[in-house]
């Protein structure tokens, strides 16, 4: 009887670990389901009325006016040193509502 209780406890623990792992993976991938194409990253705070956009320019992170084609300023943050997810976000354009958000994101990318 004791062996049966130990086996049941181990099974419950394994099931709980599996559920936790699935939840963690879902959180990392953003819960991407069938409505998101494979490889597509969606910025959760995307705002079409953004004042600024962070994008890559000559291999570095640059600040653009929304809809602008030339950078307002460039940084010394090299895109190749960033994580793949950050590089993808910069490739599609990272919207910022105001200067404070620009400074916060640049600080995060630079660290």
Image: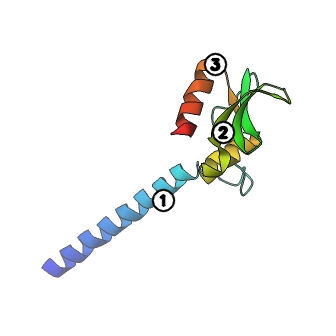
Element assignment for label 2: loop
**Rendered view: 61 above or below 30:** above
Which residue in the protein does label 2 denote?
43
Residue 16 is left or right of residue 39, and the answer is left
Q: Is residue 53 above or below residue 34?
A: above
| Residue in the image at 21% along x and 79% along y | 4
Cα distance between the residues tagged 1 and 2: 22 Å
The mark lying in front, picked from 1 and 2, is: 2
Kindly report the distance in space between the C-alpha atoms of the residues bearing marks 1 and 3.
37 Å
Relative vertical location of residue 28 with respect to residue 61 in this rendering, above or below: below
Q: Which residue is mark 3?
A: 99
Q: Is the Cβ of the residue at disc 3 closer than 8 Å to that at disc 2? A: no
Residue 7 showing in the rendered view: yes
Residue located 57% across and 39% down the image: 109
Q: Judging from the image, what secondary structure is the residue with disc 1 in?
A: helix
- From the image, tell me which residue sits under label 1: 22
10 Å crowding of disc 1: few (<14), some (14-19), many (20+): few
Residue 14: x and y in percent read 34, 68
Q: x and y percent of residue 102 in the render?
A: 62, 25
Q: Is residue 1 visible?
A: no
Q: For this view, does 72 lie left or right of residue 85?
A: right
Which residue is rendered at x = 84% and y = 29% of the image? 70
């Amino acid at each position: 009887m004791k062996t049966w209780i130990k086996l049941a406890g181990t099974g419950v623990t394994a099931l709980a670990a599996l559920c936790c792992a699935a939840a963690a993976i879902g959180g990392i991938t953003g819960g991407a389901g069938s409505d998101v194409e494979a490889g597509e990253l969606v910025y959760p705070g995307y705002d079409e009325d953004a004042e600024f956009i962070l994008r890559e320019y000559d291999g570095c992170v640059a600040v653009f006016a929304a809809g602008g084609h030339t950078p307002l300023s460039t940084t010394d943050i090299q895109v190749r040193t960033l994580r793949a997810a950050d590089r993808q976000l910069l490739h599609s354009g990272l919207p910022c509502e105001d200067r404070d958000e620009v400074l916060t994101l640049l600080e995060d990318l630079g660290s």
